[in-house]
Amino acid sequence: MELRLASLSAAPPLPGCLPRHSLSPCLKVPCSRCSDPLSTDIQSPIYSTPSLSYKVPGTRRCHASVATSYMETSEVADLDWENLGFGLIDTDFMYVAKCGPDGIFSKGEILPFGHIALSPSAGVLNYGQGLFEGLKAYRKTDGSILLFRPEENAIRMITGAERMCMPAPTVEQFIDAVKQTVLANKRWVPPTGKGSLYIRPLLMGSGAVLGLAPAPEYTFIIFVSPVGNYFKEGLSPINLIVEDKFHRASPGGTGGVKTIGNYASVLKAQKIAKGKGYSDVLYLDAVHDKYLEEVSSCNIFVVKGNVISTPAIKGTILPGITRKSIIEVAQSKGFKVEERLVSVDELLDADEVFCTGTAVVVSPVGSITYLGKRVEYGNQGVGVVSQQLHKSLTSLQMGVVEDCMGWTVQLESVGSAAKIQIRRQRSDQPDHSNSPRQTLEERRGEGIRDSEQSRP
């Protein structure tokens, strides 16, 4: 169904926001970065809706008499793609789904990107009951969009949710939600070779609890942001320090799942290391204090001759999807890959060292410092193995070469239109957003997300 723009009034958009002329012939929700409210009336050849209005950037609510579908934008956002770093850039939409005590997630919805309402006693805030994932979307030279192994992220979230006593979306629902979110934010996918669209699925205990117990309600959210290189060095070598005081995980803990608490615990050591000029921290095992585990947010590989070694997955190390992919790519190129205990002595004697992760992809290591001793690799240049594996994997992720591994998923629009469902709310329902007595249940029932207060 094609939707025709009937009326539109708004102040000029901020840089990077969607040009107003591109709203026609399809309905587009205003960018959350704009400073003035935008009101849009929609007419359809089949039926008409009285109004669809959004307020930006104060309390963000959507009112619609019926669910509506609209095309994704074909334009690319006006950003400085040449200098894109790894930081949050507010995009247009996010995906939200809820789950109650029955453990079944509702059909998710695409909403304007913005703040969410949480009780101060939410399980995620009080007891850290939360998980997240990370994956990327890439734009091919023909303009189409590719996802990289989204089913692996879905499976890892299910595994992590079981450890954290949480329900999780099915693999099918997870992938469908990712597709919807990316298509709704298609204009934020960087041009080919300029970066990627980072996708952040987040699962959290949003229900209120006081005593230590699983939350009674869970929320599954996906938001996205265009990103460049994770490390400011890019593909240039990074410098790591081996941590000898703090540990990231211990046997029997949660080091092997992507729970939010794993990342808060590394911030102190990381801050100290960066203050001394290092790029990041490499952790050792908590039992023997001599075997490699992982860097703060990525896995580690050690190269010696034709053998590539990486710490085995035994519950304290995150089973990285990029790690898994690099192992398979390396084996296909004739390297011998060993997953085992790797000592710090082997690290210092290596020919080459590199890290892998969704954010960093493949990052060569230029130096390792351990107990005051600094060892450099390849004269601080990019190692041959690192460069070869980086090129092979990124070429596959971006669709430059044929995907003989079957890892990429190309997003298909429906007749060049992405069908996105927006939140239903009957037009005759009152807006209680300014009522201090309105309960959370009332707000959920009306589909209002009004936790965000107006910005100064």
Image (spheres, rainbow, N blue to C red):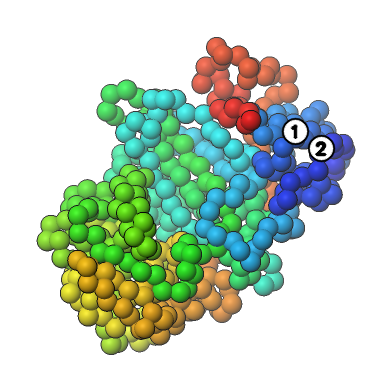
Disc 2 versus disc 1: distance between alpha carbons? Answer: 7 Å
Q: Residue at x 52, y 46 (%)?
A: 222
Q: Position of residue 112 (x, y in %)?
A: 64, 39
Tell me the SS state at disc 2.
loop
Task: Judge the density around disc 2: few (<14), some (14-19), many (≥20) Cα neighbours within 10 Å.
Answer: some
Could you tell whether 75 is left or right of 352 in the image?
right
- Return the disc, 2 or 1, that comes first in the chain's sequence: 2
Q: Residue at x 56, y 43 (%)?
A: 95
Badge 2 is on which residue? 10
Q: Residue furthest top?
A: 437
Residue 163 lies in quadrant: top left
Q: Residue furthest left?
A: 288
Residue 368 lies in quadrant: bottom left
Q: Is residue 354 above or below residue 150?
A: below
The amino acid pointed to by label 2 is Ala
Look at the image and tell me whether residue 407 can be seen: no
Q: Residue at x 52, y 58 (%)?
A: 86
Badge 1 is on which residue? 37
Could you tell whether 352 is left or right of 196 in the image?
left
- Relative to the observer, which residue lies in front, 174 or 140? 140
Q: Is residue 94 above or below residue 225?
A: above
Q: Position of residue 172 (x, y in %)?
A: 49, 51
Task: Judge the density around disc 1: few (<14), some (14-19), many (≥20) Cα neighbours within 10 Å.
Answer: some
Could you tell whether 189 is left or right of 219 in the image?
right
Query: Do callouts 2 and 1 mark residues in contact (Cβ within 8 Å)?
Result: yes
Q: Is residue 108 above or below residue 357?
A: above
The amino acid pointed to by label 1 is Pro
Q: Residue at x 81, y 37 (%)?
A: 10
Residue 38 lies in quadrant: top right
Quadrant assignment for the C terminus? top right
Could you tell whether 138 is left or right of 256 in the image?
right
